[in-house]
Amino acid sequence: MGTARTVLHPRPLGVPYWSCVRRPYAGLSRHPKQHPQPLNTPPHSSEKGPKRKGLFRRIWGYVFAWEIVYLFVYEPLRDRGAFDVIAQSTIFRIVGPKRVRPKPSSVIDKAEAPLYQPIVGTKEIRLLTLEPGQRDDEIKCRLSNVKLSWRTRYEALSYTWGDPKVTAPIKVSGHDVEVTANLHSALKDLRHTNKPRYLWVDAVCINQADLEEKAHQIMLMGSIYSHARQVLIYLGPASSDSGQAIESIKYINSKMLALHIRRYETRLNALGPWGGMLLNYLPAQKPLPAEFDWQPVISLLQRPWFQRTWVIQEAILAQRGLVICGDKSVPWLKFERVSYDIYMYHHSVRTIPNYDTIDSVVRGLTMMRLARVDHGRLHAASLLTRFNPGALWEYSKLLDLIVDTRRFSCTESRDKIYGLLGITYQSINNKYITPNYSLSVEEVFKSFVLWEVLTNSSLRVLGLNSDKASTTYSLPSWAPDFTRLSSQEPLLRRENRITFRAAGNTKVDASVSEDGTTLSLRGQVMDRVHTLTAKQDCSHQSIYIPPELSERVAGKEEQSTWYCDLQKKREWLAGVLSVATAAFDRLEANKAPLLDFFKTTSATTVQILGKPRRPEWEMLWRTLTCDHNDFYNTLPSFYREWVIAYTDLLREGLRAEKIFIQKWLLRAQQAESGITLFAEGRRFAGTDGGLIGWVPADTMEGDVVVIPYGSRVPLVVRSDGKGKYRLVGDCYIHGLMDGQAINAKGREERETVISLV
């Protein structure tokens, strides 16, 4: 009973008996070495490696499978509203909206009852119930106060108000209400014949006469549009070709799979080789039939909806959108895809007639698409979308959104700021940014700048330029007119790519005067503008010189465009080289202590593209491009030859050799794209200290170059002769951009308070 029982197993020939005996107690074994290692010893690393690799492959396979399902199953079903239909026909048949007031049915016909019941809750809104009827029937509606929550099911209307003087009557809760003609048309086109429709319409659901309520509801606009089961994007009543335009958009969507799938290129590349292989299998896009008529699509894209500021957040925040024109419709995401297809088709497949008339609209739709990606990244079911380490978040900050929407218009100037609050991920619960329509436009614009500088500790906003000469507002130099922002691209628009850090590791030190007119910044005076090139419009036509001598005959009608453009660019370059050469001479003569950190070669010339050049050409080519390409990425060293080849082609002009043109023209065009990006709206300048760079077009000789603490770029300011300055704009001065100059010898003498008025 007390002895251990021995278990015997069949023993193969040549195998010792004891190796086939399993003993219950290892301690009683005469041969403990039969166990290669103790039971509690972890396996060797060589054993763990294959297991880890196998686990990693399985996880990566699951992620890849989920992304494929998400892209090609979940997103199409979501876009078509399949999940919304299921929810609407099941749970929301039982669970209705949470009303915060009794149904107003008992007072619908009582004109003495107020049209608007007060809004008292923080999440309270009004919904407009559009009663069923035939097209020619009177429009009847009623208002209900409800709580904004997951239980509240409604559709939000996105439309343009139109001319406020042209109105039509509708009946709302027993009251006659005048609405704009465009809204009247929308309600007629959206009305069902057999059931009510629950809508949120800003012009009716918000008491426009109550400024306090209006400000409160604007703070909820982001939630209102993101909670809506669908956003109805109403482009206007039907026209003679609008129906054909909608059908053409559906046709383009079905024929351009090879183009619109490129929207997912970044996400698929994040999957590694598998994603890249999938992209490689895509066929090339074929041109549409020659008889395809683009004009109806172009006419549709020229409708007022595509120029309105408010539609941006309405389209970006929509869980699901439907584009409606008359009685025809197309899903918003399909419409959005087609806009991308149009852009890619025009630039890579075949020229679209009259494309230039819709270029700004297509770019605006592209911006909305990218902003949707940024906004959706916070809530996406796609793992690679939500946790993408390469995400730059370039369309989620309020300042960036304002810059990118500067071509959009709005009736109320304050809405250039307030109309975008619902999209930004930044906190807007701040005294400077809270909507307040009782403030003047000037106060709203100044408050936004102060919010950026004092709350966000960022001086990027000071790089925005506007047309102050024609503005109707009385603004200090540090507050731009946001209704008239220039097309000049701010140096820090892509702040997560740009590597400038002019102020090094210093922090913003700013304050504002009690009367709100003077913005004071602590920083350093670095240099003074000495010489400038003439103002000149930047050409967006790429440099071109025919390789064959027989084709370089100036004056031929078919060659006049490229030849005239070439001549203008040669004049521009001659001015740049003149300013740069004079600056290099001053740099060599001054030997300023500020530039002790700047080392030049002892050689008198350097060989670049087979020609001897001054060593300062290293400064020149980097300055021309602001040391970044047209994608805002830092330039590699080989870019030097591309930029200098561009200058050589301009200088040689019609005398350029065929071999040189064939080898360098395409690279020169690529370099020119980066130069044009930063040169637009700026002038080339040389400073007293011998530095060169790009300054705002309104800069004058004698203006001062300063670096405020905490700023990533220098600023150009102009003294008023009374110890204060007027802001001109941001600038690129080569040698002041990396934080070394601000710590150079003589810092105490340069340090000052820069008071901007």
Image (cartoon, grey):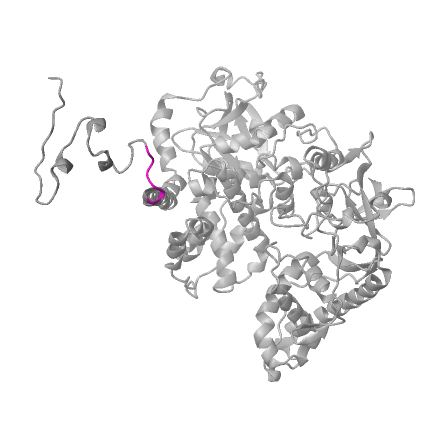
Of helix, strand and loop, which mostly describes the magenta segment?
loop
71 with respect to 585 (left or right): left
| Residue 639: quarter of image | bottom right
656 with respect to 335 (left or right): right
Most distant residue in the front direction:
30
Relative to the observer, which residue lies in front, 390 or 319? Answer: 390
Relative to the observer, which residue lies in front, 651 or 698? Answer: 651
Image coords of residue 7 (percent x, y) = 11, 29
730 with respect to 261 (left or right): right
Image coords of residue 4 (percent x, y) = 14, 23
Please say whether residue 472 is one of the residues in the magenta stretch. Answer: no
Image coords of residue 45 (percent x, y) = 36, 42
Relative to the observer, which residue lies in front, 694 or 244? Answer: 694
Image coords of residue 166 (percent x, y) = 62, 38
The answer to whether residue 482 is visible is no
243 w.r.t. 207: above or below: below
Most distant residue in the right direction:
722
How many badges with numbers are in the image?
A: 0
739 w.r.t. 453: above or below: below
Q: Which residues are magenta?
A: 41-46
Please say whether residue 45 is one of the residues in the magenta stretch. Answer: yes
Relative to the observer, which residue lies in front, 756 or 338? Answer: 756
56 with respect to 295 (left or right): left
